[in-house]
Image (cartoon, rainbow, N blue to C red):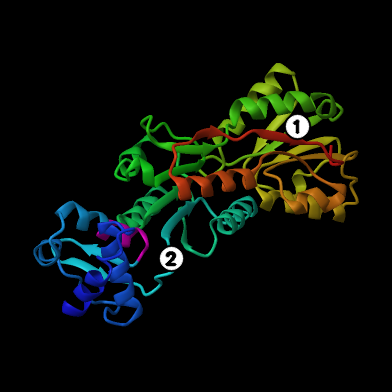
């Protein structure tokens, strides 16, 4: 313990550094110099209080910061252990998403760029599976300084999320009703989808039928289904909700609304094979915009939020920890597919 203590004592004469920073920087220097190695146990807080003489809360704060940087892990009843030598990392961030869809890839790439190299990001996917989500949360509990989570929209995960302090948790993409001191940057689905469909009503009504690809009990937002049903009822449009795509479904005179990129690409592939003209023989509306939808087949009409804006605001929260509660606007991008 003595070599470590000497590194902390060396910093005590630098009056611009707070006491807890002396401890953090002393331990970091000890890691850099191989005085402390991965797997080594740190002195207990009680031992440090006795040796250095600072208040217990000072060491608690210092050890907590080291945990947030991903350098130290606390093991119940066993103490604190060095788990990484990446001392250049300012904060270790857990990013938990539904799956690596193209729009979530856009979110990740922007989030990664905005945070920079001093922030370490580990990505996990729960695939809208409650059991998997709980397993992930159990495995990463108390191991990260910040948690950015796209939550499953079920009330029984709220107690799990509330175990994370509000200044270390940000909900993104899907909204979940948390206590008022928790932050979120989300999108709204039902009202805005209905509104955008109303804007497209003149184009949709040129076709004979409106088909939505939607499978329940998946990661697709059910609010989009509610909006679709409301729209077709109020505008008296012949319609169908289809769970799974098959080539035989594709008929002239129909508009297809695809939330899933997988079904969208299948529709486009079969339309080309059948020599259907996109935007006249059949219409297509997609959810969640990206560069491919902007270009493919002269452009696909989309209803989408801006995931880059969402990611940039999420990065600001991680850096500053100022509470944010914001719903990102959803845009209609009219292109040649309708």
Q: Give the range drawn in magenta.
A: 62-70
Residue position marked by numbered label 2 in the rendering: 89
277 or 61, nearer to the observer: 61
Whether residue 182 is in magenta: the answer is no
Q: Can residue 149 be seen in this view?
A: no
Quarter placement of the N terminus:
bottom left
Cβ atoms at labels 2 and 1 below 8 Å apart: no
**Residue at 75%, 44% in the rendered image:** 249
- Relative image position of residue 151 (x, y in whole percent): 45, 43
Residue under the image location 67 percent in, 25 percent down:
194
Instruction: Tell me what residue is drawn at x 33 percent, y 67 percent.
Output: 71
Q: Depth check: give the residue in front, 15 or 56.
A: 15
Position of 51 compared to 179: left or right? Answer: left
- Main secondary-structure element of the magenta-colored stretch: helix
- The location of residue 296, given as percent across then percent down, is 82, 52
- Which label sits on residue 100? none
Vertically, is 10 above or below 125? below
Residue with the most extreme left position: 50
Residue topped by disc 1 = 210
Mark 2 burial class by Cα count in 10 Å: few <14, some 14-19, many 20+: some
Q: In this view, does 223 lie above or below 310?
A: above
């Amino acid at each position: 313990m003595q070599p470590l203590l000497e590194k902390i004592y060396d910093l005590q004469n630098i009056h611009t550094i707070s006491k807890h920073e002396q401890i953090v920087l002393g331990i970091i220097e000890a890691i850099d110099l191989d005085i402390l190695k991965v797997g080594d146990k740190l002195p207990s807080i009680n031992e440090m209080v006795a040796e250095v003489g600072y208040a217990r809360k000072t060491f608690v704060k210092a050890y907590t910061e080291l945990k947030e940087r991903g350098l130290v892990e606390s093991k119940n009843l066993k103490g604190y252990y060095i788990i990484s030598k990446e001392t250049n990392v300012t904060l270790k961030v857990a990013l938990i998403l539904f799956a690596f869809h193209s729009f979530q890839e856009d979110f990740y790439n922007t989030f990664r760029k905005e945070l920079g190299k001093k922030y370490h990001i580990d990505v996990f996917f729960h695939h809208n599976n409650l059991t998997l989500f709980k397993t992930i949360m159990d495995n990463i509990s108390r191991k990260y300084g910040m948690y950015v989570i796209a939550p499953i929209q079920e009330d029984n995960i709220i107690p799990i999320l509330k175990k994370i302090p509000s200044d270390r948790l940000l909900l993104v993409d899907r909204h979940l009703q948390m206590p008022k001191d928790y932050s979120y940057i989300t999108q709204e689905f039902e009202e805005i989808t209905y509104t955008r469909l109303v804007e497209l009503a003149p184009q949709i009504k040129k076709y004979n039928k409106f088909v939505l690809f939607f499978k329940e009990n998946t990661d697709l937002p059910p609010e989009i289904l509610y909006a679709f049903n409301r729209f077709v009822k109020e505008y008296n449009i012949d319609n169908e909700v289809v769970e799974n795509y098959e080539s035989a479904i594709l008929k002239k005179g129909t508009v297809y609304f695809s939330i899933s990129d997988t079904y969208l690409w299948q529709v486009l592939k079969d339309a080309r094979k059948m020599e259907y003209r996109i935007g006249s023989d059949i219409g297509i509306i997609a959810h969640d915009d990206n560069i491919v939808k902007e270009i493919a087949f002269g452009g696909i009409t989309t209803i989408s939020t801006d995931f880059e804006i969402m990611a940039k605001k999420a990065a600001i929260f991680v850096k500053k920890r100022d509470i944010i509660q914001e719903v990102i606007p959803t845009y209609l991008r009219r292109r040649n597919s309708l």
